[in-house]
Image (spheres, grey):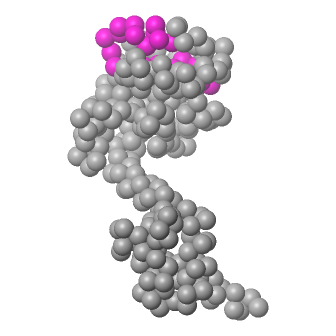
Amino acid sequence: MGVHAAPTLITSVQRALRLMEAVGAHEGGVPAKRLARETRLPLATTYHLLRTLVHDGYLRRLDDGGFVIGDKLHTLESGSREQALLAGIRPTLTALRDELSAAAYLTFYDEGEIRVVDIVDGPHAPRVDLWVGYKDAGHATALGKCVLRELDDDARYDYLARHPLFGLTPRTVTRSDDLLRRLDSPTGSPLVADLEEYALGTVCFAVPISWGDGDRLGSLGVSLPVARLARLARLDPHRELFRTHLVPTANRVSRHLSLTI
C-alpha cells in the first residue's frame, strides 16, 4: 500500500497543475469538457480535480460553467513578487543592522493596515518579542506611528476607528487625541521614537519611506535594548546616530521600490 501511495499522490498533483495551466491559457473561462480534451484526462477525473481546486480557491467557477484562475493563485503570485522585491532590499537592511548593531524592520501600509514585511536581526541584534502583532499596535510602535504621521486626517481616523489603542505598557498612549497631538507636534526631524511603549526594555526608532508617486507609504526602523540606548545617550544625546543612518537608508529603500514596482 505504501509503495503505491506516493506515485498516486504525485500523479494527482501533476494532473491538478496541468489543469491550472490549461485554465490559465483561457482568459475568459473554459468549460470542463474542453479542459478534459486539452489535458487528455478522463472527464470524471477532470470534474473531481476541478471541484477540489475550486473548493481550495485555486480556481473559480463562473456562472456559465467555465473555470478561471482563483484568488488563491493570485495571492501566491503577489506573495512571490513581494518576496523577490524584498530580496533586493535585504542587503540594505542587513547593512543597517550591522552599522547600528540593532534589528532592522520594514513595514508597508497596505489597504489601511500597517504590515511588517521584513525583519533582519542577528545574535548581537535581537528582534523585539512580537507578542502583539504590529497590525494592531501601530499606536505603540515607532514604525506604526511613523506611518500614521504621514497619513491624511481621513486615513488616520479610519485607522484609529478600527484599531483600539490598547495599553501595552505603562508608557503606551491610549487616548486618540493625545496620540494625534503627538503625531502633529513639529519636531524638525523625520525620526519617530517608541520608548518602551510597545515592550518594556525595548526602544525603537523609525523614519518614513514612500514610493511610486508618493502614494505608497511604509516605514524603516531599528530596535535595541533600553540599556544600550542609555549608554549611547551619553555620547549621542540628540539621537543623531539613528537619524544619520536611518534617513539615507530609507532613501535608498524608497528609490529601490520606486524603480521596481
Residue nearest the viewer, comparing 56 with 91 = 56
Residue in the picture at 25% in, 42% down? 258
Q: Quadrant of the N terminus?
A: bottom right
Residue 196 seen in the current view: no
Q: Is residue 95 left or right of residue 193?
A: left
Q: Position of residue 255 (x, y in %)?
A: 24, 40
Residue in the picture at 41% in, 78% down? 22
Residue in the picture at 55% in, 21% down? 161
Q: Is residue 260 left or right of residue 233?
A: left
Q: Is residue 154 magenta?
A: no
**Farthest-out residue, front:** 64
Residue in the picture at 51% in, 59% down? 72
Q: Position of residue 3 (x, y in %)?
A: 71, 92
Q: Position of residue 257 (x, y in %)?
A: 29, 43
Asked if 122 appears above or below 164 in the picture, the reply is below
Q: Is residue 246 left or right of residue 165?
A: left
Residue 119 seen in the current view: yes
Q: Total number of numbered labels?
A: 0
Q: Which residues are magenta?
A: 179-200
